[in-house]
Amino acid sequence: MCDNEKEEAANLKEEFEWVLREEVHSILHQLHTVLVECAHRFPVPLYGNEGQKQDKFILTSQPEQLKCIVTLTGDSITHADISFKVLRQMHTICRTSINQDGPWKLQQIQDAANHLQQAIGYIDNVDKHYVFRSSDEVLHIIQCLLGSLQRARTALVLPKKKAIDELMKSRNMKALSPNLPEDLAISFYIQSHKLIFVAYQLSSVHGTMRIDSCQADCAVPWLSDVLYMLTASLHMCQQLKDKLCVFSQYKDFTVGSRSASMVFN
Amino acid sequence: MPGTNLIVPVVLWGKYAPTHCISSVYLSRDQKTLVTGCYDGQVCIWQVEPETLKMTPRCLLVGHTAPVTCISRASIIQDNNFIVTSSEAGEMCTWDLVDGKCRESVKITQVHTNIQAYHMCNSEDLRLFCNGYYAEILIMDPFSLELMFSLSSKMNPDWISALHVLRPSSRKDDVVLAISITGTVKVWSLLGHENKQSEPIYENESKQIRCLNALSLNCCAHNQRTVLIVCAKYCQIYDAGDFSVLCSITAPAGERWMSGDFMATDRVLVWSTEGKGYLYKLPANSVPDHKGFHGPTVAHDSPVLYGMLAHPDNKLLSCPPAMRLVATSSGGKQRRLLLRGDSHGVVSLWSVDDSAPLTQTVVMEAREDSHGVVSLWSVDDSAPLTQTVLTHAPLVTTSLDAAWAAMAPRPVGVLDQMHAPDEPGQYPNHDPTCPQC
C-alpha cells in the first residue's frame, strides 16, 4: 500500500470511530426525541403520557346514506350514534348505538402504540455512555428499531382483514344496542390518518352470497402527526444504517484496531 | 413458501461458513437434535451425539423471510422428528427434521414472540400456546398450523408478554397463567372442549401488579406456589396465591435480564443479555416449605448468588445471544442444560446441575430436618459468596466456523473456483451440496 492509501485508510478508521462514539449516540438521541413526541400524540397512556384523551367525530356519506357520530376515548369508541339506509329498501333506516358499557375497541391504535413503545425501549436500553465497539452492534439495534417502527406504521396504514362471519361474531358487534339484524354488520377501523365506518349488507342472489357495503370516513388529526413522525424516524434510521454500511464493508474495523502511533500522528 | 409460484431453494455451500446470527435455539429432549434459528430467517439443524454432546451442522432450512423468533417441538412422541418455527413476519413452518422438508407452512397476521408446546388434558398431542404482538393467546395445532381456539381478555385487554400453561396437582384441568405488557396478571382455566366456534373465552381472574413489559413468567414446577417473573431490569418472585412480591433481584450493572426459571423450590437460574447465567438461592420468605414464607423481607436474608455460567473469553457480541433452559433425558439420565447461541453462530451448552455446587439433594435433606437447613444456609450465607462465586465454563462450545475449519478438504462453492485458479487439485468433490450429506 502506498502512503496515500495508508493515509486514506487511517482517516477512514478515524471517521468510523467518530461515527460510533459521537454520531450514533447523537442520532439515537434525536430519534428518541421524535419517538417520545410521537408517543405523546397518542390518546392512550404511553411513555409518560398520562390520561385518555377524548375526541368527537362525525362521519357522513353523500347522499345521506349513512351518518355516525362517534366519541373516541383512548383506543376505544365509547359512544356512537349510528344510522344508515338499508340498501334496496330505500325507506328503511337502521339505527343502533355504542355506549360506555360495550366500547368498540380499535385494536390498531393499541398495536401501533405498543410497537412504538417497543421502539423507544430499544433506544432506552442503550446507555448514553456506552461505547459501541463494532458497526454490527449498532446495525442490530437499528434493525430492531426499523422492525418496530415499520410494524407500528403498518398497524395504522394496513388494517387487518377480517372475514365477514368473524366480524359478525366479534365482541364489538355484540355490544351494539340494539343488536343489528342478522344480515347487517358494521365495522370501524383506521386506515392511514382516517377513521372509517362501514356498513355491510348480506344478501342472497340466486343462491350465492353477496355483500354490499357503504362507507364514510373522517380525518383524525393526531393520526396524521403520528404517521408523519413514524415516517420521519424510519427515514432517520435508514440514514444511520446507510452511514454504517459504508464502514461495514471493512470487516476488520473495530474500535481499537487502529494502531496507537496513528492516533498521535 | 405460501403463494402460487413454486420456489425451490437451493443451498450452495462455499469455502466459508454462512453468517448465522442466532435469534432462537432449541434442543430435543433426547439430546440428538439441536436447532438454531437466525436473524436472516434460516434455520440450522445440528446433529448431536447424546453422550458427548458433539454437534455437527447437518441442514440449513430456508423458508422464513424474517428473524426466527420461536422454535418448538411438535409432538410428545420422543422420536417424532418434527419441529415448528415461527418468524417475525408471521410465518410458521412445520419441518421434518430427517430430510429438512417443510411439511406445512402458513402466514398469519399475528406475529408470535413466544410459543409453549403443551399437552392438554383432553387432546391427543401437543398444542402450541402462542403469544405475541396481539391481544389474545392463540392455541394452534403444530401439524396443521390451524388455530384451535383463542383466549381473550375482559380486563385491560392488551398484548400478552409472557405465559405459562400448567396442570395444578390438585386439578384435572389446565390453567393458563399470563401477564400483559401493562402488568395485568390473568388466569384462564381450560376444560378441554374449547373450540373456534365457542363464545370468546375470557379470563377467570385478573389482577393488576406493578410489572411492565415482563419477558418471562414461570410457575415453580416443584410447588406450584411461587412464580418467577423476569423483566429487563429486575426479576421477582411472586406468591401465586395473591400475587404479592416476595423478593427481587436486580440485573448486574450493564446487563439486562432476558429470562429465567426455577431450578428447585429455593433456587432460580436467570440469564442476561450478556449471555451469562446466574444461579441464585432464594431467601426464606420466598420458599413455600419454609416457616418464614410470605413474611417480610429480612435485611440479612436476600437472594444469594452462588454460581455463574459464562464464557471464559467473553467475546464481543453484536447482539444479545438467544438462550434457553432445556430438560433432557438421554440413556436414563435426566439433565438440565442451558443453551446459548450467539451472533457469531457459536453454540454453547452448560449442564446446570453439574455446575451448581448446592443441588437438589441438599434441599431434600433440608426438608427432613428443617433446623439442619437453617444452619446449612447460614453457613453458606456467612461466607462472602459474592467474592467467591464460581464461574462455570460451558460443557461444549462449537460454531459453524469451527465445523467448517474441521473439514478437510473444505467445501467447494460454485464461485470459489474462479477465485483460486492457481490451486489445482483442491476440488475433489464437485457436488455443491451440503458437505455433511
Image (cartoon, coloured by chain):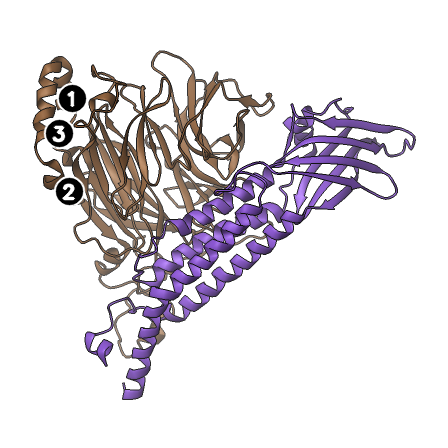
Q: Nearer the viewer, residue A88 or B285?
A: B285
Separation (CA) of disc 2 from disc 3:
14 Å
Under tag 1, what secondary structure? Answer: helix
Tell me the amino acid under the disc marked 2. Answer: His
Dot 2 surroundings within 10 Å: few (below 14), some, or many (20 or more)? many
Residue A170 position, x and y percent, is 65, 28
Q: How many marks?
A: 3
Name the residue carrying label 2.
Answer: B392
Name the residue carrying label 1.
Answer: B363
- Colour used to depict chain B in the structure image: brown
Horizontal side of residue A216 vs B289, given as left or right: right
Dot 1 surroundings within 10 Å: few (below 14), some, or many (20 or more)? some
Q: Earlier in the sequence, mark 2 or mark 1?
A: 1
User: Within the image, what quadrant is residue A44 found in?
Assistant: top right
Tell me the amino acid under the disc marked 1. Answer: Val
Under tag 3, what secondary structure? Answer: loop
Q: Which chain is purple?
A: A
Residue B239 position, x and y percent, is 33, 21
**Same-chain check, marks 3 and 1:** yes
Q: Earlier in the sequence, mark 3 or mark 1?
A: 3
Residue at x-position 20% and y-position 40%: B350
Q: Identify the chain of the residue marked 2, using the numbered disc in the image.
A: B
**Residue at the farthest top position:** B170
